[in-house]
Amino acid sequence: MTKGSCMCGAIGYEYTGEPMVTALCHCTDCQKWSGGAYTTNVVVPRKDFKVVKGSPKHYNIKGDSGKMNDHWFCGDCGSSLYTELEESSPNTPKVMPDAVCIKAGGIDDKSVRDFKKLGVEFYCKDRLGFAAPVEGAEQKPVFG
């Protein structure tokens, strides 16, 4: 079981099993949310993820895909925790209906968040000039 938390410890979560993929996201939304050039993500099945301590807050915003991005964070310290990518309307399928994108920086075990192979980089069209592509990672101009 892999555990994670926010910076102040008010929120805790855990997941079982292996990640579906590891990913960087360069979209403008992730840049603004993280305050950096991209977010570093461990994508896991929703059924294997749960919040075990505290009650995270969330903020919904329509992403570049037109879908709603539901960003979960600690209301006390502001740490980014995870994202769920949802449908933009009841008749539109979810972007990742069975997955949670955990922000890797919150994972407690450094050996887990220091993954040796990155699977994919999303929204490379928004990549900042100083952020070089990661060798061996699939490069996607947008999501999906």
Image (spheres, helix red, strand yellow):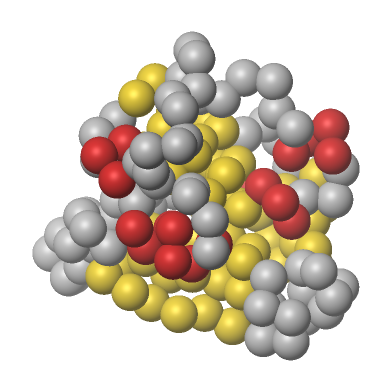
> Can you say whether 83 is above or below 114 in the image?
below
- In the image: residue 144, left or right of residue 6: left
Q: Determine if residue 62 is in view.
A: yes
In-front residue for pair 54/91: 54
Q: In this picture, is 118 found above or below 25?
A: above
The total number of labels drawn is 0
Comparing 18 with 31, the one in front is: 31
* Residue under the point 84% across and 32% down: 111
Q: Is residue 84 visible?
A: no
**To which quarter of the image does residue 127 belong?**
top left
The answer to whether residue 128 is left or right of residue 13 is: left
Direction bottom: furthest residue: 76
Q: Quadrant of residue 34?
A: bottom right
**Quarter of the image with the N terminus in it:** top right
Can you name the residue that lies furthest to the left here? 91
Q: Residue 84 at what x, y percent from top left?
A: 45, 61
Please state if 21 lies on the left or on the right of 78 as rendered.
Answer: left
Q: Residue at x 79, y 56 (%)?
A: 4
Q: Is residue 101 above or below residue 10?
A: above
In the displayed structure image, the side of residue 82 where residue 74 appears, left or right: right
In the image, 53 versus 90, the foreground residue is 53
